[in-house]
């Protein structure tokens, strides 16, 4: 497989073999509360149970496993979880990892990457700035770059989630997938629709700085301004020279829905109080869209709880109904059930 060859279900099945026993088979559990509230069985794919606390381990492990022989080290730009995945995979292989991040990335995610043995470079206030530093490391230090979303092995690795969901619960009719650079959505949609062409795959993001949404609306990849968000893992651009994930999302997603910070806040509370799950804001956008009345379910549905690597002081403020400050914006406190 190359950067330009079309991805197929066979590539995702090959990735599943690579991940076997390391980053596969996370639980798919029912949510009785959400199922009752929205009138159809509702399932949660718990990628927050991965060794690094996030789904990104799948794509990173698959990409690192397929590096050319003799690769000296790897680099990437990341909003947090991809960096953790690359750091973990590089440590397993015994090679150097340098993760480039913007100043908007929460400190908890920076600390988590360093704890896994990777170097961290903080550059600028956008993913584009971090990407430029990653490209410099490729050109000047000979490191191999692993894109968070626009790499065929990364997309195939993330696609194993869709494979596991549909092979476990073939009756599922709709998948609600958090959408950022599109690696997760593209891989999951490819796997799910290969197994069940009638399945709906809906990408969901925050309503400020949603790069894939704006690119799909424009008809080509575009740059967006980035904002501090409870769904910080969904921030960042998709790359003006995007090779894979943009076209795959364009062709495979049935819809894209946006949610507000207040709706994400509410959904984080819901998941915590009703299902006892600690999860990042980027995980709950599907639940947020349902609670806001932006989606209507037609049958059994699943969403992906993508990660748990969040600032616990912020999370505590949310579940106790306190104000949360995001850059120059304040989300007013909302006690759960009020």
Image: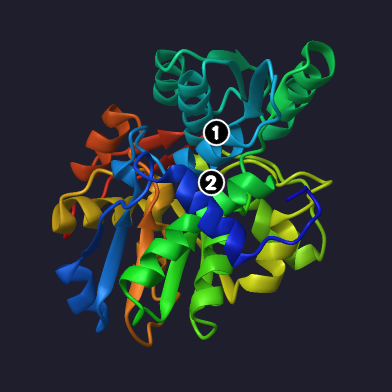
**Image coordinates for residue 291, horizontal then vertical, percent:** 33, 69
**Image coordinates for residue 143, horizontal then vertical, percent:** 72, 19
Q: Is residue 322 left or right of residue 213?
A: left
Residue appearing at x 60%, y 45% in the figure: 154
N-terminal-most mark, 2 or 1? 1
Q: Secondary structure at mark 1?
A: loop
Residue appearing at x 45%, y 64% in the figure: 163
In terms of depth relative to the viewer, which is nearer, 136 or 269? Answer: 136
- The colour scheme applied to this rendered structure is rainbow
Binning the other alpha carbons within 10 Å of mark 1 as few (below 14), some (14 to 19) or many (20 upward) gives: many
In terms of depth relative to the viewer, which is nearer, 168 or 212? Answer: 168
Q: Is residue 294 left or right of residue 280?
A: right
The answer, for residue 132, to whether it is visible in the render is yes
User: Would you place residue 135 above or below residue 243 in this image?
Assistant: above
**Image coordinates for residue 267, horizontal then vertical, percent:** 31, 57
Q: Is residue 178 left or right of residue 322?
A: right
- Residue with the mark numbered 2: 234
Snapshot quadrant of residue 51: top left
Residue appearing at x 45%, y 74% in the figure: 294
User: Would you place residue 182 above or below residue 233 in this image?
Assistant: below
Cβ–Cβ under 8 Å for marks 2 and 1: yes
Rendered-image quadrant of the C terminus? bottom left
Snapshot quadrant of residue 311: top left
In terms of depth relative to the viewer, which is nearer, 208 or 78? Answer: 78
- Residue with the mark numbered 1: 79
Q: Which mark is residue 122?
A: none
Q: How many marks on residues? A: 2
Spatial CA distance of label 2 from label 1 is: 8 Å
In terms of depth relative to the viewer, which is nearer, 68 or 290? Answer: 68
Binning the other alpha carbons within 10 Å of mark 2 as few (below 14), some (14 to 19) or many (20 upward) gives: many
């Amino acid at each position: 497989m190359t950067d330009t060859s079309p991805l197929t279900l066979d590539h995702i099945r090959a990735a599943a073999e690579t991940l076997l026993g390391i980053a596969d088979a996370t639980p798919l559990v029912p949510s009785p509360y959400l199922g009752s509230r929205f009138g159809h069985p509702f399932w949660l794919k718990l990628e927050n149970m991965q060794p690094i606390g996030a789904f990104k381990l799948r794509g990173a492990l698959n990409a690192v496993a397929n590096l050319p022989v003799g690769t000296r080290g790897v680099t990437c730009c990341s909003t947090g979880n991809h960096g953790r995945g690359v750091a973990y995979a590089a440590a397993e292989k015994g090679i150097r990892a340098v993760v480039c991040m913007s100043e908007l990335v929460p400190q908890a995610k920076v600390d988590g990457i360093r704890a896994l043995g990777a170097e961290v470079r903080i550059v600028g206030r956008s993913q584009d700035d971090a990407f430029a530093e990653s490209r410099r490391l490729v050109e000047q230090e000979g490191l191999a770059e692993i894109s968070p979303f626009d790499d065929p092995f990364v997309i195939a690795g993330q696609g194993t989630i869709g494979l596991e969901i549909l092979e476990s619960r073939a009756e599922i009719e709709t998948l609600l997938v958090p959408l950022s650079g599109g690696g997760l959505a593209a891989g999951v949609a490819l796997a799910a629709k290969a197994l069940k062409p009638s399945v709906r795959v809906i990408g969901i993001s925050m309503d400020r700085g949603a790069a894939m949404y704006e690119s799909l609306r424009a008809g080509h990849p575009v740059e967006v301004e980035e904002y501090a968000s409870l769904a910080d893992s969904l921030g960042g651009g998709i790359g003006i020279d995007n090779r894979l994930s943009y076209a795959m999302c364009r062709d495979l997603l049935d819809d894209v829905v946006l949610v507000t910070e207040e709706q994400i806040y509410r959904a984080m509370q819901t998941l915590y109080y009703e299902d006892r799950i600690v999860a990042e804001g980027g995980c709950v956008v599907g639940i947020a869209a349902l609670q806001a009345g932006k989606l209507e379910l037609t049958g059994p549905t699943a969403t992906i709880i993508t990660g748990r690597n969040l600032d616990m002081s912020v999370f505590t403020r949310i579940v106790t109904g306190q104000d949360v400050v995001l850059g120059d914006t304040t989300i007013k406190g909302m006690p759960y059930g009020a």
